[in-house]
Amino acid sequence: MTSSSSITIYRQDYTVPPFLVDHIDLTFDLGPSVTQVKATTRLRHNPESESHDIVLYGEALELVKIVMNGKTLAKSDYATDNGELRIANVPDDVTLVVDTLIHPDQNTSLMGLYLSNGNFFTQCEAEGFRKITWYPDRPDVMATYTVTIRADKEKYPVLLSNGNLVETGDLPNNRHYAVWDDPFRKPSYLFALVAGNLVCREETFKLADGRDVLLQVWVEKNNLDKTAHAMESLKHSIRWDESRFGLELDLDRFMIVAVSDFNMGAMENKGLNIFNTRYILANPRVATDTDYANIESVVGHEYFHNWTGDRVTCRDWFQLSLKEGLTVFRDQEFSADLTGSDSGRAVKRIEDVRTLRQLQFPEDAGPMAHPVRPDAYQEINNFYTVTVYEKGAEVVRMYQTLFGRDGFRKGMDLYFSRHDGNAVTCNDFLAAMADANGRDLSQFERWYSQAGTPRVRLESHYDEKERTLTVSLSQFCPPTPGQTEKQPFLIPFAIGLLDSKGNDMPLRLKGGKDSGTSCILELSDASQTFTFVDVAEKPVISALRNFSAPVILEYEQSDDELLHLLSHDSDHFNRWEAGQRLAARRLVSLTKAVQDGQPLTLDTAFADAFRTVLSDTSLDAALRELALTLPSEMMVAERLDEIDPHAIHQARQFMRRTLAEKLEKEWRDAWDRNRTEGTYRPVPSDAGKRALKNLALSYLLALDNPVYCQMAIEQYNRADNMTDRLAALTSLVHSGCMNRHPEAKALLDDFYREFENEALVIDKWFSLQATSPHAGIETITTLMEHPAFTLKNPNRARSLIFGFCHNNMAQFHAADGSGYEFWSKNLIELDRINPQVAARLARCMDQWKRYIPSLRKPAEQALRHVSEQPLSRDTREIIEKTLSA
Ligand code: B3K
Ligand code: ZN
């Protein structure tokens, strides 16, 4: 699908739907090349609307006929324009019967009804239902559904849709059918159908109220042995939502289906969640600790949507963060609670903030910057962004930071009591939080309406005589596309004070009462001063504890202060943060030194601080691993006005190698002492040890010493789990060991052969090569020609192409522009197959205006070349915004 003219849709233009749907009856006669769809819809005029027109949406449909209240409509009875079908001046109550034909085997966009490994799947969010039939495909039209599926019995023994199975039976010609009934009103984006040759793991599970429910995880037959963890995660999710939010499963049956061809992670269709196999399949042989953790969090996320998304949904797509920000927050809290410890919670918080900074901060500072609740879009699929999701989750978290867990829960309870069964807005959520806590939150609304990452400047003064500490906070939010002036935000700013021994000091604000050892300052003006009294000595300030707001803190702390925080802060997050700031400061100067041709050096104090952390066995291994992982190249780029990818890469490599040299003995010890005992368990304590051990290995391999190469080879050969195996192989490839040792080289082939039939592992095989700093464009081109490579499968395309373009800064930005050329060629090709995935690839160039001049030119050339092609609406929107930034 290509379009040259793009229409912009504005939030302000929202109007209520002229007709509401009470019920829809869908019948599918499934065939791979032709599927017949009959939709019988009962519509009723919406008294809130002045229009009496029925507006249906459709895309790539072959319309057979429309029958309205028993009469077949002639072409002249309706108007079609740009995917809209309008029947004017319709009576108040109508029954519409729409017959269409669709062609699943030609659908490579993976939206609507499509095939994956010969089985049928649907994906309807955001606007995929219109690829199935003409319908008022908008989230504020909610209906009950009855779905009849007919198909060949042998090829498609399993027929699934939302809700409850009410009837099955045989038909002539070796066909059979199933009827599903979903009693919950839902928007069309939550519709789902699956038909094929699948098997399931199932269990009966008792809910808190004593009801028994049937839980199923459906997969292709060869994957049944990889479903246990997903099932466990589902049960944990159900329990957690009951206990933390008092929310129960409302269905008798809850199904999960895994599919290999999928545009994103998963989809929360009512009662029938569909997942990318990547977020379901796991056993120790094929999945890493990270895979296990991701599965738990995504299974949780989709399950939690049942209340925050399905029962209460969005009025329009501008409100997407209403369900996504809230549900991400819920899944983050779920994973944190499940770790069962404070340090586990901190690990989770650090990982989440790292993602936010690494991906969302750049988005907020680039051409695609948009508010958590966007004001305009051309293609809604382009707005399933880290801003809507991750920043949206931070916004939800701030309510909890302001009101505490109990206050937050009160707000949630009020939200459900007001809005259950409805399609609502972000402001409705805010109002529930405000009313439940007796607070005026009108200023807080700016978190939804203003784009950009606010900067908060901290200055402090300690008065020894008065024993007071004044803390001045000021805020500023840089302009973003379409938003030049910004109003101050309401910022919850968590703060603590450390004495010279590293202990937390008691806090008392002037004129206030004692506030423990950590308190929340509410910054609401452009600048404000807070005075702490009875401060016994000049403290070291621990600012923005636990990252209490999604802002950039500008506070010049000395190395000594940061080292003090790194060794003593009771706030785990800020201990980690102090280490990152120390490292980032040095990486920035090293980058400049590379650019200026100066010699590179690293101070002993810094190396010693890292040594202390590494050897501090009182700290969880997982926390140490996070603290000792250097800020990524992308994070360093964020701190520079002009991005010189090669200089950044060299600087970071230098720092890694130096830390490897100076701490060689400690790394060796860490590798030796963090081996896990017994059979593999994906629990946080063991996973933390493996992470630290494998970080140690990767540092040691930077030393270019054959002994360590051998050590990695042995780890690979002895490993009884994918985490250790993949870590060894990745370190061997990324360190360059692979190129020097034939024995190591053989491992890559060995790995391929062993996992040839495990698609998700082959993705890892592509991706680890694509992200290697030694993988030049020739390597990537050779991999593209590998028989296992295809652009049609999103996971495969992502593993190789995104791996290279997004996560291989050193090679992608080759001076001759070959990386950019590769990007444009593949983008154009991918766009013809799958616009949604292509539009994601288009985002690789977000930062091009900040590249050094020698790269800016070829980057612009590549962008212009793409923009001259016929493009999908998805990709066109991104390319145009990127070019015009
Ligand atoms: N709601 C889906 C995302 C749909 C993306 C459409 N382009 C998954 C999720 O956030 O849970
Ligand atoms: Zn979601």
Image (tube, rainbow, N blue to C red):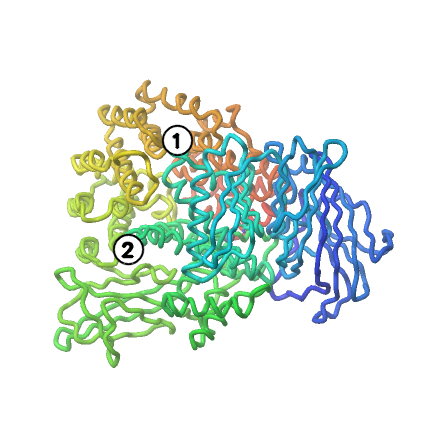
Task: Out of 515 and 284, give the one closest to the viewer.
Answer: 284
- Judged from the image, the secondary structure of the residue bearing numbered disc 2 is helix
Q: Is residue 734 visible?
A: no
Measured as percent of width and height from the top left, residue 700 is found at: 24, 33
Q: Is residue 294 visible?
A: yes
Residue furthest bottom in the image: 511
Residue furthest top in the image: 742
The amino acid marked with disc number 2 is: Asp
Mark with earlier residue (2, 1): 1
The amino acid marked with disc number 1 is: Arg
Task: Out of 274 and 847, give the one closest to the viewer.
Answer: 274
Q: Which residue is mark 1?
A: 285
Q: Residue drawn 73% across and 63% down? A: 19
Q: Is residue 378 above or below residue 484?
A: above
- Give the mark count: 2
The part of the image, by quadrant, that contains residue 148 is top right
Q: Which residue is mark 2?
A: 342
The part of the image, by quadrant, that contains residue 550 is bottom left
Within 10 Å of disc 1 (Cα), the crowding (few <14, some 14-19, many 20+) is some
Q: Which mark is residue 335?
A: none
Is the distance from the Cβ of mark 2 to the nearest ligand 2 atom less than 8 Å? Answer: no
Q: Is residue 362 above or below residue 88?
A: above
The Cα–Cα distance between marks 2 and 1, rounded to whole angstroms, is 30 Å
